[in-house]
Image: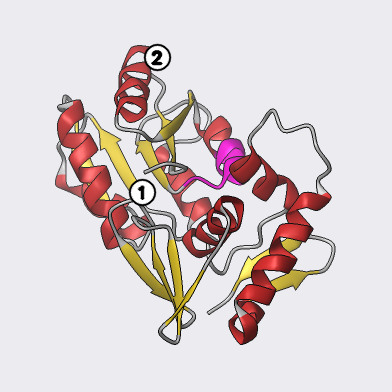
Amino acid sequence: MKGIRILVAEDEDKLREIVLKYLNKEGYQGFGAADGEEALDLWAEKKPDCIILDVTMPKLDGFEVLAEIRETDNVPVIMLTARREEDDKIQGFEVGADDYVTKPFSPRELMVRIKALLKRSGVVTTDNQLDVCGVHLNAEERQLTIDDEIINLTQKEFEVLTFFINHHQLVLSREQILDRVWGYDYEGDIRVVDTTIKRLRKKMNKKGECIQTVRGLGYKFKE
């Protein structure tokens, strides 16, 4: 599950910290938001692989946040609510929620739901495989196969390709790719992103065309 980022948008500080603690324990990279506006800012900046989204938050509620996210992103979303009314859950599903957890809940149950949702949504984790754009990605063995041919990738090439596949159809900036793959504290040249993508495209031969350059913005992976 290395590299899987999860945004926890929850205004209750104690609950948010508990969830983040469990996420880190399970090997995920978790980061938190205390209100709806912060949640949208972090979503746009970090491009998480999954979002835990509280319904009732200051500034923007969970429904408003999810509605804006769904305009451009199909990231898996689990909504948290203290409400038990059926109408609230129906509204969440209509806006685009993938799952619902009612407070109070067991953090262990939430972790199980997250793992199951990631698998259903096609997010590449260390215990699953994915076929996109005619390429087969085996995350457990860190292996790429194209037309039955095994392609050897460096660690960074594999991580870049995984990031693309997990966010296919979305435009990813060089800064986002650098932050995800090389880390916040990387002090080298940002052109390492372009160099790595160039090598990756060459190794993928014709399938390298799936990685498209979006002039002035970055790259996207298109099926």
- As drawn, is 196 to the left or to the right of 84? right
Residue 95, position as x, y percentages in the image: 37, 56
* Residue 217, quarter of the rendered image: bottom right
Tell me where residue 36 appears, x and y as whole percent: 50, 33
What colour scheme does the image use?
secondary structure
Which tag, 2 or 1, sits closer to the chain's start? 2
- Image quarter hosting the N terminus: top left
Task: Please tell me in which quadrant of the rendered image residue 10 appears.
Answer: top left
Label 2 Cα neighbours within 10 Å, binned few <14 / some 14-19 / many ≥20: few
Q: Is residue 71 visible?
A: no
**Callout 1: SS:** strand
Q: Name the residue under label 1.
A: 77
Q: Which residue bears the numbered disc 2? A: 13
Q: What element carries label 2?
A: helix
**Marker disc for residue 161:** none
Q: Is residue 121 left or right of residue 9?
A: left
Q: Give me the residue at 17% from left, 30% from top.
A: 108
Tell me whether the residue at label 2 lies in contact with that at label 1, contact meaning CB atoms closer than 8 angstroms.
Answer: no
Q: In this view, does 35 lie above or below 134?
A: above
Q: Which of 195 and 96 is in front in this view?
A: 195
Disc 2 marks a residue whose amino acid type is Asp
Mark 1 Cα within 10 Å, few/some/many (few <14, many 20+)?
many
Q: Is residue 208 above or below residue 20?
A: below
* Magenta span: 40-48
Is residue 38 toward the left or the right of residue 11 in the image?
Answer: right
| Residue 22, above or below 204 | above
Q: Which residue is drawn at 33% across and 30% down?
A: 23
Quarter of the rendering containing residue 20: top left
Residue type (three-letter) at the residue carrying disc 1: Val
Q: Is residue 39 left or right of residue 107?
A: right
Residue 65 placed where, x, y %? 48, 44
